[in-house]
Amino acid sequence: MKRVLILGAHSYIGTALEERLAASPERFSTRTLSLHEPLETLDFHGADAAVLVAAIVHRKETKALLPLYGAVNRDLAVAAAKKAKAEGVGQFVFLSTMSVYGMTTGVITRETVPQPNTAYGRTKLEAERAIAALSDERFTVTILRPPMVIGKGAKGNYARLERLAKKLPFCPDFENRRSFVRIDTLCEALEERIAEPRAGIFFPQEPETIATRDLIDETAAAEGRTLKHTKWFNPAIRLFRALTTTGKKAFGDLEYRDLTALPLPAEKEEP
């Protein structure tokens, strides 16, 4: 049986992972810890794997908030990994993000160099590199860079689409393609990585990309609504997408292509 620590109480992904692993009590036992508590008061001894899901994300990056990104997404994450290694945990799973690439549109392949342009993406990449440097034959570091996570209760862009789907009387019939991962698929990938530890960077995603239009339809259907499609607003959407970051995030094309795994990054590698 694998003994798993989930670091990040009450988080969306952490809660979903805990529920999934609990469905296989013969294979996994879980313990969830809150990182709001001082790290030195927590006990990691006896765990086979620690999964870090806690992070500062989906907040406006004001000047006042920027230090918090570094303190939590990088410094706390690295400290947790060092503590896990020191206390005999065999594997550290770090949930990173597609945002390390700094792209709102385009295609990301194994040759694409991370160039984060937000505090969230930058601090996640810095944490990746510092944690990867801890990897050795006794301490396996596993990093996941999921794209947009969707599922009821998901945050970020998906939450915005949910709000639109509840209010719009129609759905823009606009064609774009985005990589995404359903929360169940992400938890399945986490379970696989815990069951068979491998060092490296992994890219959990659905086999097909999806259009924003289809996401809106899906979330509306979950509310018992069926939206009519219209192309009437497509010229405005094209302009919105070309001129604003919000438009690119909402209606841009952004995908992982032919990308399933990479070796761990070097700590001092420059983006």
Image (cartoon, grey):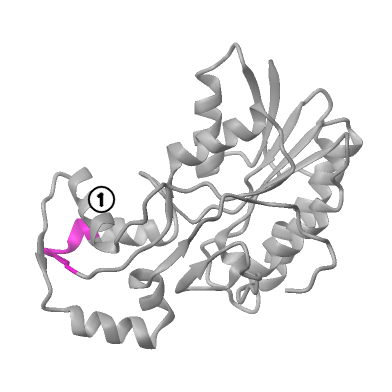
Is residue 239 depicted above or below 20 in this figure?
below
Q: Is residue 267 left or right of residue 124?
A: right
The amino acid marked with disc number 1 is Thr
Q: Nearer the viewer, residue 31 or 64?
A: 31
Is residue 251 a member of the stretch shown in magenta?
no
Q: Residue furthest right?
A: 86
Determine whether the residue tagged by mark 1 lies in a helix, strand or loop: helix
74 vs 208: above or below = below
Residue 171 placement (x, y as % from top left) = 16, 64
Q: Position of residue 62 (x, y in %)?
A: 59, 77
Using residue 259 as the reference point, say whether residue 88 is left or right of it.
Answer: right
Q: Is residue 142 left or right of residue 167?
A: right
Question: Looking at the picture, how far across and down is residue 190, in whole percent?
Answer: 58, 37
Q: Residues within 10 Å of mark 1 (few under 14, many from 20)?
A: many
Which of the two residues, 42 or 126, is positioned nearer the viewer here? 126
Give the image quarter of residue 209: bottom left
**Above or below for 25 versus 230:** above
Q: Please give the residue where the numbered disc 1 appears in the rendered image.
A: 219
Q: Residue at x 79, y 45 (%)?
A: 80
The span picked out in magenta is 165-173
Write the residue at 38% across / 70% down: 253
Q: Is residue 36 visible?
A: no
Quarter of the image where the C terminus is located? bottom right
Query: Which residue is at 58% across, 58% downward?
Result: 97
Q: Nearer the viewer, residue 14 or 255?
A: 255
Task: Work out whether residue 44 can be spotted.
Answer: yes
Figure label count? 1
Please identify the quadrant where the N terminus is shown.
top right
Quadrant in which residue 198 is drawn? top right
